[in-house]
Image (spheres, rainbow, N blue to C red):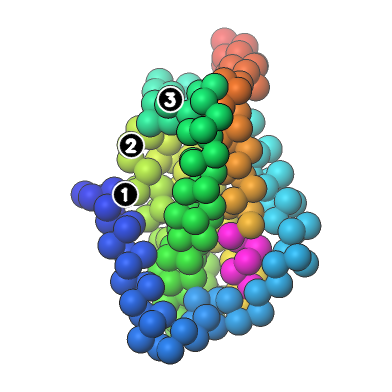
Amino acid sequence: MWWFGGPGYLLGLAISLVTLWAIKWDWSWFGLEEAKWIASIVPAIGYTMIIILLNDFLIEPLTEILTNEPVDLSNFDGMRGNLQNLLIMLAIMWVMAAFGEEFFYRGYVMKRLAILFGNNNSSWILAVFISSILFGLTHGYQGISGMITTGIVGLILALAFYRNRSNLAVGILTHGIYDTYGVLLIYFEKELVLKNIMIEIYQTIIN
């Protein structure tokens, strides 16, 4: 994942899907044995708010100040003000990011690591951090600040799965809602407004 980034994730997703086929579509293997989609919407919105408040408003601006490098979102420039590209991105995002990344990083990697390390609370906590680091590394195209802040987002998503080990739907919906919020900000070219306010506040405190 460090060397290949996105293609590394796609290979991992392919392996997890082949595994799902090999175990005769046993969704419980990936934490979806008690998927409650409607009931998971409210907690997903709660986790999304935590990510926005903790990561977007507090950690990301501070990270950009400390690294002197903004999160690189240039890969999404084609979506700015372009409704067609926005709709295409939303569709891809919900399938490949919300479902695909949660299915692989949390349902496959995190759960397998937790079981491998002993399937107790300590092993699950260790798996939370390892899977979050891997999640951050695969977002290297966003620069060092992007990897750090994406790792933080991954940490919150991993904690959501830790608390809902048989209901990965919470993480999938959280991921989808948060990414929808993010791409809408990019579409309207408003993703820097609140961040710049926080950066000014931090710089005032530091100075």
Residue corresponding to mark 1: 6
Residue corresponding to mark 2: 141
Q: Quadrant of the N terminus?
A: bottom left
Would residue 136 appear left or right of 59 to someone viewing this image?
left
Q: Are marks 2 and 1 in contact (CB under 8 Å)?
A: yes
**In this rendering, the label closer to the viewer, 1 or 3:** 3
Would residue 158 appear left or right of 145 to someone viewing this image?
right
The magenta stretch spans residue 11: no
**Element on which disc 1 rests:** helix
- Residue 161 lies, in percent from the top left, at 59, 66
Among numbered discs 3 and 2, the one appearing first in the sequence: 3
Would residue 62 appear left or right of 145 to someone viewing this image?
right
Badge 2 amino acid = Tyr
**Element on which disc 2 rests:** helix
Identify the residue at image location x=33%, y=77%.
18
Marks 2 and 1 sit apart, C-alpha to C-alpha, by 9 Å
Magenta stretch in the rendered image = 167-172
Identify the residue at image location x=59%, y=17%.
196
* Magenta stretch: helix, strand or loop mostly: helix
Q: Nearer the viewer, residue 12 or 145?
A: 12
What label does residue 77 carry, if any? 3
Among numbered discs 2 and 1, the one appearing first in the sequence: 1
- Residue 53 lies, in percent from the top left, at 68, 38
How many marks overall?
3
In this view, the residue farthest toward the bottom is 24
Q: Classify residue 87 by image quadrant.
A: top right
Badge 3 amino acid = Asp
Q: Nearer the viewer, residue 21 or 3?
A: 21
Q: Is residue 138 visible?
A: yes
Identify the residue at image location x=37%, y=43%.
139
